[in-house]
Image: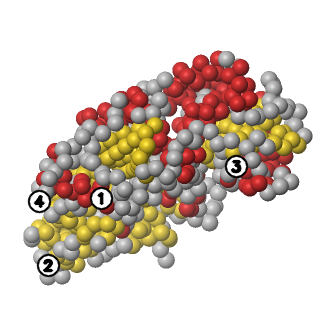
């Protein structure tokens, strides 16, 4: 058997479960590792059609293509392209590595243990306290190989949060010029948004509160625009539209009272960031948009991925505990209630919380601007990951 | 084969030809309902311990070692002494009991399973359910009877666990030794 010498590249494997979450996180990480650390990254994705939604230039039929320094491989079983052992192999969100890769790792382990790639399982983001105790622990394998669990998180002991090194600067620069948001709205085909109007981005799962929130905003004296892509949030708003939501197209809009709902085109990740920076309030979901909403330094509601036995509420509470730690008690209680009631689909309570928060917007905004610094704790995920690999 | 989620303190697993005794397990939930199991394992060949993490559905070979039904006799620091039906005594190191030590009390009558590796007692498994008396807990604040409101309680032996609010000092309660959780008030 001829053993291939380990190359310096990293492999990241991503199985797309949710349309944009898993691939959103891994794509950002791959780009950042390539751009900021000059690492050759191979990103293996099992659903390039979903990936194409956030990287419109991608050709879902190609086995291999390269964008911004990242090699994007079609991950099919069996692999179309041969796996070459690199310096690091990452299974994102506990996806199962292909058999060819596991076999290669085992062979390396038998013949030249020092040449085995560092094997990491990049886990889901959680603010729970147990993360610190589990982050970076080895996972002993029956073959003798060692995998490490890498947990993103909000503390210094955790694996950190994905945030490009210049992102905060870019956002501050963008937000300093009010014209940027209007240019963005124009480029997205969003009409009728004026200074003084309230703009809310909406990217959640289905939730019955959304319809009531829209009805509330219709009656509000301040004109409000909700920007929503086609998908799960829109399904909850079906009754507001004369046609089935499946037939709506990007650029369509409907006005009812003070509220205008705009159907957003899908954008790449940079434009989505800019959208979050440009809105007054963001309703986000899952992991990727949740984190980007925090970097946007705007108030937000997190619609967390639902879990059995309402366990997601434990995770939500753990995040809110951290997020609201420095807030005055009244605001802390309100933000907590708004997010919790929204996630529990308690309609009247959520609307009441929303109403009560309107007078506190300046405080909320100030907190949202301070939060990224607290959340990052001095270093982002890519920096900590590279450091871990270097010292591992 | 057992999944990481099914393993409990006292089980012995084989990883890369090395037997490890599970001393402690802690299950948490990651994203999308996936379980993460953190374990403290003791290497039976090198007498060293390590902390490790598994996916809940990771499968591993559990090995069946010699086991004997025993009862707890006494504690001789740092050993817990157990005795079989023929009055043979076996010493088990405190750290090898893991979380089970919280439920070991003088005079306990439950039958425990002592596991041996190469003639040495290496771990003890308690019955899945045990009954212990609550030595102290705050009185219920609102007379909740649903069992959903919880509070801390100290049980005989000194361990503190979370119990339903209706539990009173002096009550006997059933505890799940796999999780350390309160099950119900014993009749």
Measure the alpha-carbon separation of dots 1 and 2.
Answer: 55 Å
Q: Which mark is residue A100?
A: 1
Q: Is residue B155 above or below residue A255?
A: below
Front of the two marks 2 and 3: 3
The residue sitting at the left extreme is B119
Marks 4 and 2: CB-CB under 8 Å?
A: no
Q: Is label 4 in a helix, a strand or a loop?
A: loop
- Evaluate whether residue B184 shows in this view: yes
x then y, percent, for residue A7: 24, 40
- Looking at the figure, which quarter contains the N terminus of chain A? bottom left
Measure the alpha-carbon separation of dots 4 and 1.
Answer: 32 Å
Q: Which residue is mark 2?
A: B87
Q: Which mark is residue A230?
A: 3
Front of the two marks 4 and 2: 4
x then y, percent, for residue A232: 67, 53
| Dot 2 alpha-carbon crowd within 10 angstroms: few under 14, some 14 to 19, many 20 or more | few
Residue located at (74% from left, 29% from top)? A186
């Amino acid at each position: 058997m001829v053993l291939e010498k380990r190359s310096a590249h990293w492999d990241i494997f991503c199985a797309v479960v949710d349309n944009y979450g898993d691939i959103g996180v891994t794509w950002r990480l791959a780009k950042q590792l390539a751009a900021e650390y000059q690492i050759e990254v191979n990103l293996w994705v099992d659903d390039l059609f979903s990936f194409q939604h956030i990287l419109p230039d991608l050709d879902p039929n190609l086995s291999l293509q390269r964008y911004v320094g990242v090699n994007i491989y079609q991950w099919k079983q069996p692999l179309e392209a041969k796996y070459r052992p690199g310096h690091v192999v990452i299974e994102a969100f506990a996806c199962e590595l292909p058999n060819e890769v596991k076999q290669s790792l085992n062979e390396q382990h038998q013949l030249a243990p020092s040449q085995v790639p560092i094997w990491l399982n990049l886990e889901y983001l959680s603010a729970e306290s147990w993360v610190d105790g589990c982050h970076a622990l080895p996972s002993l394998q029956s073959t003798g190989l060692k995998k490490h669990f890498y947990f993103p998180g909000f503390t210094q002991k955790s694996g950190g949060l994905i945030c490009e090194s210049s992102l905060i600067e870019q956002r501050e620069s963008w937000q300093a010029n009010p014209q940027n948001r209007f240019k963005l709205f124009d480029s997205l085909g969003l009409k009728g948004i004026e200074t003084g109007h309230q703009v809310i981005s909406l990217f959640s799962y289905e939730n019955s509160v959304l319809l009531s929130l829209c009805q509330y905003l219709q009656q509000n004296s301040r004109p409000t625009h909700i920007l929503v892509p086609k998908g799960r949030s829109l399904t909850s708003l079906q009754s507001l539209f004369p046609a089935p939501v499946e037939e709506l197209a990007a650029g369509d809009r409907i006005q009812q009272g003070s509220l205008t709902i705009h159907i957003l085109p899908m954008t790449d990740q940079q434009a989505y960031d800019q959208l979050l920076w440009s809105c007054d309030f963001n309703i986000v979901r899952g992991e990727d948009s949740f984190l980007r909403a925090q970097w946007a330094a705007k108030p937000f509601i997190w619609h967390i991925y639902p879990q059995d036995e309402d366990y997601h509420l434990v995770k939500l509470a753990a995040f809110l505990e951290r997020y609201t730690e420095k807030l005055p008690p009244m605001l802390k209680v309100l933000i907590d209630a708004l997010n919790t009631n929204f996630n529990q689909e308690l309609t009247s309570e959520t609307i009441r919380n929303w109403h009560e928060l309107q007078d506190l917007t300046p405080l909320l905004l100030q907190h949202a601007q301070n939060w990224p610094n607290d959340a990052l704790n001095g270093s982002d995920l890519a920096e900590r990951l590279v450091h871990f690999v270097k010292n591992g | 084969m057992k999944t990481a989620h099914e393993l409990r303190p006292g089980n012995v697993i084989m990883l890369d030809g090395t037997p490890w005794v599970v001393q402690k397990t802690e299950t948490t939930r990651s994203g999308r309902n996936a379980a993460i199991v953190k374990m403290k394992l003791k290497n039976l060949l090198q007498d060293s311990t390590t902390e490790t993490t598994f996916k809940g559905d990771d499968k591993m070979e559990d090995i069946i070692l010699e086991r004997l039904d025993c009862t707890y006799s006494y504690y001789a620091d740092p050993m817990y002494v157990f005795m079989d039906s023929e009055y043979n005594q076996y010493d088990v190191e405190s750290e090898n009991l893991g979380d089970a030590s919280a439920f070991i009390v003088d005079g306990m009558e439950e039958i425990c399973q002592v596991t041996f590796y190469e003639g040495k007692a290496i771990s003890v498994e308690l019955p899945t359910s045990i009954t212990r008396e609550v030595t102290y807990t705050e009185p219920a604040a609102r007379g909740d009877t649903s069992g959903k409101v919880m509070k801390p309680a100290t049980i005989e032996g000194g361990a503190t666990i979370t119990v339903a609010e209706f539990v009173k000092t002096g009550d006997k309660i059933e505890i799940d030794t796999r999780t350390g959780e309160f099950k119900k008030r014993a009749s």
